[in-house]
Image (cartoon, rainbow, N blue to C red):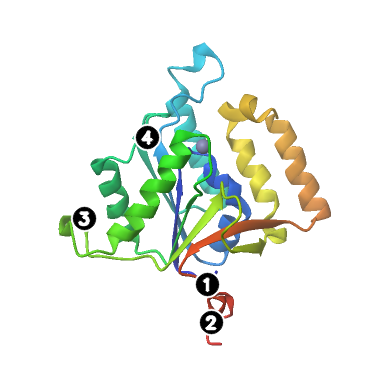
Amino acid sequence: MNYDTVVVFGAHADDEITMAGTIARMSQSGVRVVVVTMTNGCEGYPRPEMKDVIVELRRREAAECDKVLGIQRREILDIPDMGLVNDKETLQRCIKIIREERPDAVFTHGPVDRHRDHLNTHVITVEARWHAGEPVAADLGPPWYPPHLYYYKAVTGGLPAIVIDVTETAEKRAEALATQVSQHTLFGRTKQDFEAEAESIRKNRPKRTEQFWIADGVQLSDFLPKGI
Ligand SMILES: [Zn+2]
């Protein structure tokens, strides 16, 4: 993935951690990685007393995750959790970010998912990526059509896939998950669990990979070193 800039769309402020090893690998090699988080995570509270602070907690945890993975810009669109829809405003905000960043590739959720925010992130991203390239809505910036589109989860068959070796950055996923303290009840693991996993990976360096489904626009030559 010899890219200059990529934009990763996620419904919630931990979805992009699915591809943490790849994000870390890209950012370490100089790729500008931008994450767009559609919702504010307001329903992600496991106990009633957390309801009033969950949005702020998740914002802070996202900022910690950005440091771990080398994410250069994160836009949180602040839409209520479980309330994301493909309305005009949200679509245009996504088009504007794509036109600002002019990414080589866009990553998003796949189409097979029970969570409405995940599904709608998929639908909005696919449309925004196309609409960003059309000569319309000129106030949102000059047209830009990101040539490559990948899904990083929620796909069942039917699409070609690529496997990225993330052995060298494999501990980053556990380190990123360790930052998401408000979600640890949901994950069924503690911060100490994730820190121990990261330590074990650093020590033993097991082979790890991440998979992506090629939705559109990628050819084999895109994965060869530049100049070949
Ligand atoms: Zn999610």
Q: Is residue 125 left or right of residue 204?
A: left
Q: Earlier in the sequence, mark 1 or mark 2?
A: 1
Disc 2 beta carbon < 8 A from ligand 1?
A: no
Q: To which residue does mark 3 refer?
A: 140
Q: Earlier in the sequence, mark 4 or mark 2?
A: 4
The disc placed on residue 2 is: 1
- In this view, the residue farthest toward the top is 49
Q: To which residue does mark 4 refer?
A: 84
Give the CA separation, mark 4 to mark 3.
21 Å
x, y percent for residue 197 = 76, 42
Give yes or no for contact between labels 1 and 2 (Cβ–Cβ under 8 Å).
Answer: yes
Q: Give the secondary structure at mark 3.
A: helix
Give yes or no for contact between labels 4 and 1 (Cβ–Cβ under 8 Å).
Answer: no
Give neighbour class at mark 4: few <14, some 14-19, many 20+ (Cα, 10 Å).
many
- Residue type for callout 2: Lys
**Number of numbered callouts drawn:** 4
Give the CA separation, mark 4 to mark 2.
39 Å
Q: Earlier in the sequence, mark 4 or mark 3?
A: 4
Give the CA separation, mark 1 to mark 3.
27 Å
Q: Is residue 187 left or right of residue 216?
A: right
Q: Give the secondary structure at mark 1.
A: loop
Q: Residue at x 82, y 52 (%)?
A: 203
Q: Earlier in the sequence, mark 1 or mark 3?
A: 1
Q: Residue at x 29, y 42 (%)?
A: 90
Q: Earlier in the sequence, mark 2 or mark 3?
A: 3
Q: Is residue 83 left or right of residue 198?
A: left
Q: Give the secondary structure at mark 4.
A: loop
Give neighbour class at mark 3: few <14, some 14-19, many 20+ (Cα, 10 Å).
some
Q: Residue at x 49, y 47 (%)?
A: 111
Q: Earlier in the sequence, mark 4 or mark 1?
A: 1
- Residue type for callout 3: Leu
x, y percent for residue 60 = 48, 34
